[in-house]
Amino acid sequence: MDYPGTWVMTQTWEQLLFLHWKITPQYMDLLLPKELELDTYQGSAWLTVLPFQVSHQRIRLLPELPLLRAYRELNVRTYVKYKGKPGVYFFSLDVDHPLAVIGGKTAGLPFHLAKIDLHQNGSLVSFTSSRMFKQGAFSTEYAPISKPVPVEAGSLDYWLLERYSLFVKLGKLVLQGDIRHEHWEVSGASVRIMENSILPFKVISEPEQMHFCARKTAYIFPFRKVPMGRAF
């Protein structure tokens, strides 16, 4: 897997929960920038909610800084392609770190400052998030229920998880950001959702797919401009 340039930041992600809902493509496509193509698996679009904790964050060539090294995050994303390249598109990224919000918004990402708590009791993780300046809250408890295993190439799990690019529309530009990390190994998860008002539209069903990963270290590359226009 080739990446342009050199990574600029590294993070460790901990206690990751992936909650995946199958969505009718016509509903999802209406919410995307016109430059991006909705990616589907066997005719269905997917929406994912992802709570986790960031730790050991540092900028390349610098040590970990106390004010920047750790925070909690909650992502809502779907799956897209741009000129044939698969990636993700974020509807929202809630974090409890003001500097992360400022940095993310500068790049055109929909960051929101939130009050987030993550507690672990044995294998059980409790996660709650509430946005500070607009509506949106999420609360769940989750735990792994199996040993982690690699995702199988060609499977739905692989399609959902093995994504190494994100796309964002910033003014008249489309920007691509890349990450690099080891391939996913995930466990099944037992999940209880108590509150969920952060989705771009109402979902009343339970998630069709759920994954848990205890830890993953990622390397983040700088955003770059990619040529405009849809290739489909």
Image (cartoon, rainbow, N blue to C red):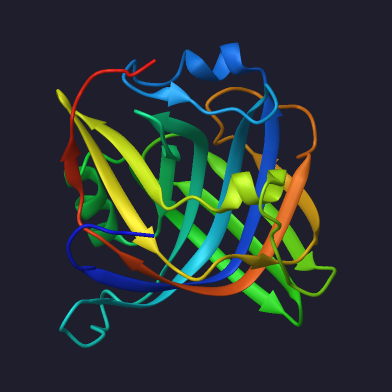
- Report x, y in % for residue 222: 20, 56
Figure quadrant of the N terminus: bottom left
- Report x, y in % for residue 17: 64, 58
Of residue 87 and residue 51, the one placed in the foreground of this image is 87
- Report x, y in % for residue 221: 25, 60
Of residue 167 and residue 96, the one placed in the foreground of this image is 167
Q: Is residue 11 left or right of residue 149?
A: left
Judge whether residue 138 can be spotted in this image.
no
Judge whether residue 27 can be spotted in this image.
yes
Question: Residue at point 70% right, 43% down?
Answer: 156
Query: Relative to 125, is 28 above or below?
Result: above
Q: Is residue 54 left or right of residue 196?
A: left
Q: Is residue 31 left or right of residue 202?
A: left
Query: Relative to 118, is 43 above or below?
Result: above
Question: Residue at point 34% right, 15% down?
Answer: 34
Of residue 47 and residue 126, the one placed in the foreground of this image is 47
Query: Relative to 34, is 217 above or below?
Result: below
